[in-house]
Image (spheres, rainbow, N blue to C red):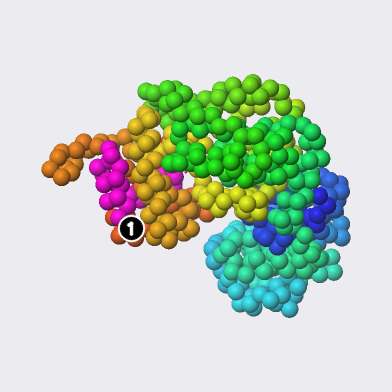
Amino acid sequence: MNKELVIVIDFGGQYNQLVARRVRECNVYCEIYSYKTDLDKIRAMNPRGIILTGGPNSCYEENAATCPPELFSLGIPVLGLCYGAQLMSLVLGGEVRRAALKEYGKTEVHVDNTTPLFAGVTADTVCWMSHNDYIARMAPGFRVIAATANCPVAAAECPEQKLYAIQFHPEVLHTVEGSKILYNFVRGICGCCGDWSMDSFVEESIKAIRNKVGGGRVLLALSGGVDSSVAAGLLSRAIGRQLTCVFVDHGLLRKNEGDEVEAIFGEKGQFDLRFVRINAQERYYDRLAGVTEPEEKRKIIGEEFIRVFEDEARKIGAVDFLAQGTIYPDVVESGLGGESAVIKSHHNVGGLPDYVNFREIIEPLRNLFKDEVRKVGLELGIPESLVLRQPFPGPGLGVRIVGEVTAEKVKIVQEADAIYREEIAQAGLDREINQYFAALTNMRSVGVMGDERTYDYAIALRAVKTVDFMTAEAADIPFAVLQKIMSRIINEVKGVNRVFYDLTSKPPGTIEFE
Ligand code: XMP
């Protein structure tokens, strides 16, 4: 695919993926590469622009991540962000020093909006700062185009060479007009016209898949999650029944989920493919009987998946390709920009290729961010309920049932969770809360129902607000909504007589219970 390309050079900043996502939001394709990437390789990629990210070090320290000065004389526009801005200044003859005052958080900044980088940006705006060092002296040829109370060079430019340095982070949402600044860079300064869109991605991928696969056979483990479902949809559109999807129902899915997956991808669904559903519930429950240790449960569920899939793959025989739903963050996180071969280390498919007779791996979503995968899914006509769904862990309800997993407990948590989801949707909160589910505690307690004593399980309701799922806060659900959910669960789900709401943030808690 011959697209306009902007590359992000990563210096270890925590927002590197965010920078690339923001660029793609400007409809410009963007990839992330390590700062160690060879200059010749960068030149050969023929990027329209280069963005240097932030990083944890000080650029003047010995052994700090750096870049060759020639990077700035390729004739390609370069935008340095935070560490990248300081490095650009240092490498080109300026000076960077430790600041007397560390700037952190939302900061008022005054920008010169007559420059192309800040065109259309309010002169006094708010940016997100996070730095210990500052540009004490600009490199020759640069001039200041933004400043804050404590940072004399909040941004600088050398328009003759199309070099731009910004001390703050335009990629972070707290920088109120950050998206506009990045748009100005990629669409204005780099001159990109914006040829990256999901509908063209679908068309081009279908062609590329057909070319690669030819008349070959492809096998995909379909979990019903977003990534593998979108991969299935895309492959199906490209090669139809040359694709076999194996869907393992491990009995740890949410209520009706197995049937929903089958309705979409099964023989009566809208996609042309071979669909094999394996109902392995009993097999899983047998393996999990008596097991209470969380890591052991996870291990068993992962291993059992491989066994089940292996049995099925043996029946299917040799295939040409094994497809995987690897997405771009998986690629970046396991070794930046395709420098190493990546096989998604998802618990479910880790190690899988050893067990299946195939020639090559095919990863049609390898270059996409999650939000792009979702757009492709919608483009392919996969229902919103699946494409926009919240994360669901590979080990499923196995990690939402504290202690031993049994068929009875699965049923309880499925029913409670279904009520919870229904009521959250009813209250119009489903888009606001990033992840929510019911879990079954291993606790039984005494209650009274009618005139009868009960001794039943307690359900815990979890609901979190989060951006990256690395940190999270408990969501502030109105008490009346919680009360209604509690009352329905206790009345409708046999075996439950108590409902808790989990207030714990992450850290110290995790989102899942195990
Ligand atoms: P924790 O519990 O670690 O979860 O705070 C963070 C996010 O990851 C999801 N999660 C998983 N996803 N396989 C997955 O694909 C897993 O084994 C797994 N465990 C946790 C969890 O739902 C949350 O969104």
Residue at screen point 56% across, 69% down? 107
User: What's the amino acid at mark 1?
Assistant: Val
Side (left or right) of 244 relative to 157: left
Could you say which is closer to the camera, residue 335 or residue 288? Answer: 288
The answer to whether mark 1 is within 8 Å of ligand 1 is no
The correct choice, above or below, for 291 with respect to 179 in the image is above
Residue at screen point 87% across, 57% down? 74
The correct choice, above or below, for 198 with respect to 448 in the image is below
The x and y percentages for residue 377 are: 63, 50
Q: Residue farthest to the front? A: 268
Q: Which residues are magenta?
A: 484-512
What secondary structure is found at the residue carrying circle 1?
helix
Could you say which is closer to the camera, residue 202 or residue 76? Answer: 202
The x and y percentages for residue 290 are: 37, 23
The correct choice, above or below, for 109 with respect to 90 in the image is below
Q: Is residue 328 magenta?
A: no
Q: Which residue is mark 1?
A: 481
Q: Residue farthest to the left? A: 451
Side (left or right) of 404 relative to 77: left
Could you say which is closer to the camera, residue 490 or residue 185? Answer: 490
Residue at screen point 40% across, 52% down? 422
The x and y percentages for residue 472 are: 46, 51
Other-residue count near label 1 (Cα within 10 Å), few / some / many at <14 / 14–19 / ≥20? some
- Specify the quadrant of the image occupied by residue 406: top left
Quarter of the figure that contains the C terminus: top left
Could you say which is closer to the camera, residue 138 or residue 446? Answer: 446
> Is residue 272 among what the camera can see?
yes
> Is residue 288 among what the camera can see?
no
The x and y percentages for residue 300 are: 48, 25
